[in-house]
């Protein structure tokens, strides 16, 4: 079952819920046109988003997802919307960047977000953060 805190944090990253999280910006804040957030702030936001997806993975698919058959088949639409909105924001932000180093960093961020979400839906990855790091190219 999806915890309220997990859903709220994903919605916060998508810019559709307000949370006061000291020292961290949401993905939506970092990618908002004209904010010009440093890439380090965006990387921290994406890492938090991935960490939240990792928590969601266990909420939906059990303590050891690879050993769970079925998992929770009921994923709230608002959660799906929040995740896909974050991925859309990252893609659009990448398309608008002129700097090649930032473009590459955003490509990595988009890949991580999309892959983590796919792995949550698949329900067969035990440690999303660890597996993403080992896949770093």
Image (cartoon, rainbow, N blue to C red):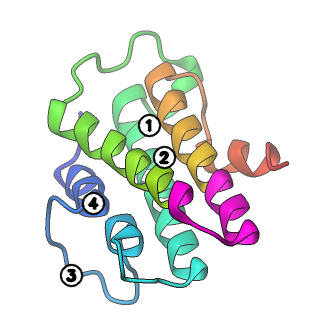
Residue 72's x, y, as percent? 30, 21
- Mark 3 or 1, closer to the camera: 3
Circle 2 residues within 10 Å: few <14, some 14–19, many ≥20: many
Residue depicted at 67% across the width and 69% down the height = 102
According to the picture, the residue beneath numbered tag 4 turns out to be 9
Return the residue found at the far top. Answer: 69
Q: Label 3 to label 1, Cα distance in Å?
A: 24 Å
Q: Nearer the viewer, residue 125 or 91?
A: 91
**Judging from the image, what secondary structure is the residue with disc 3 in?**
loop
Q: Decide: marks 1, 2 in contact (CB < 8 A)?
A: yes
Q: Is residue 105 magenta?
A: yes
Magenta part of the chain: 94-108
- Mark 4 or 2, closer to the camera: 4
- Vertical order, 96 against 30 (above or below): above
Circle 1 residues within 10 Å: few <14, some 14–19, many ≥20: many
Residue depicted at 32% across the width and 88% down the height = 22
According to the picture, the residue beneath numbered tag 2 turns out to be 54
Q: Is residue 17 magenta?
A: no
Q: Label 4 to label 3, Cα distance in Å?
A: 10 Å
- Vertical order, 2 against 118 (above or below): below
Residue 11's x, y, as percent? 22, 55
- Which label's residue is closer to the chain start, 3 or 1? 3
56 relative position to 11: left or right: right
According to the picture, the residue beneath numbered tag 3 turns out to be 20
Circle 3 residues within 10 Å: few <14, some 14–19, many ≥20: few
């Amino acid at each position: 079952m999806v915890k309220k805190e997990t859903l709220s944090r994903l919605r916060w990253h998508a810019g559709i819920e307000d949370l006061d999280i000291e020292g961290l910006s949401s993905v939506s804040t970092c990618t908002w046109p004209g904010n010009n957030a440093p890439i380090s702030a965006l990387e921290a936001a994406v890492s938090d988003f991935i960490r939240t997806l990792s928590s969601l993975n266990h909420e939906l698919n059990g303590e050891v997802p690879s050993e769970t058959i079925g998992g929770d088949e009921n994923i709230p639409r608002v959660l799906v919307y929040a995740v896909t909105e974050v991925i859309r924001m990252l893609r659009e932000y990448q398309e608008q960047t002129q700097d090649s180093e930032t473009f590459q960093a955003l490509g990595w961020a988009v890949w991580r977000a999309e892959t983590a979400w796919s792995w949550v839906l698949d329900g067969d990855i035990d440690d999303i953060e660890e597996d993403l790091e080992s896949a770093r190219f």
